[in-house]
Image (cartoon, grey):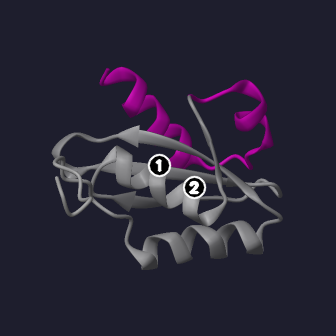
Amino acid sequence: MADGSHSTMTLEAPGNLVDGLRSFAGDHGGAKAVIEYIGRRGARIVLVGEDGVWADQFAPATDVAREACIKAGVAVENEWERELMDNMRPNTDLWRSMSRTTLSR
C-alpha cells in the first residue's frame, strides 16, 4: 500500500498490559513468561519472577501477548521448562491450572 500500512491487521499490545508486565518484572528482580493459548478468550501470560513469585495476565491473542512481553522487556519461554518450574514457589492454583492446560491439549 502506498501509505506504508500493512494489509494484515495486527492488534497492538495495550499500554496497561505492557505496564503491568514491566511492573511485575521490576518488583521481582526480572521475569520470564510462558504464553498459553486459551481459545477464543485469547492468551494467558504466566509470569515467573526471579524471586519465584508468579502471576498471570491475559491478552486478546497470543501475538499481542508476545508483543507486550517484548515491549516490557520480559523474556518469553517457548514452553514450560524444568528450570523455570523449579524457580517457582509452589502454589496449588498454579499446579491445578497447569494440569488442566496439559490435559486439555
Residue count near mark 1 (Cα–Cα under 10 Å), binned few <14, some 14–19, many ≥20: many
Q: CA distance from mark 1 to mark 2?
A: 6 Å
Relative side of 75 to 65, left or right: right
Relative side of 13 to 26, left or right: left
Residue at the (16%, 45%) spot, across then down: 40
Magenta highlight: main SS: helix
Note whether 14 is above or below 99 in the view shown. Answer: below
Q: Which mark is residue 66?
A: 1
Residue at the (78%, 35%) spot, across then down: 86
Relative side of 20 to 101, left or right: right
Residue at the (23%, 59%) spot, across then down: 5
**Is 53 inside the magenta-drawn segment?**
no
Image location (x, y in percent) of residue 39: 21, 40
What residue type is disc 1 on? Answer: Arg
Image location (x, y in percent) of residue 78: 56, 30
Residue at the (40%, 50%) spot, across then down: 44
**Is 103 inside the magenta-drawn segment?**
yes
Residue count near mark 2 (Cα–Cα under 10 Å), binned few <14, some 14–19, many ≥20: some
Which stretch appears magenta? 79-105
Image location (x, y in percent) of residue 89: 74, 50
Name the residue that disc number 2 marks. Answer: 70
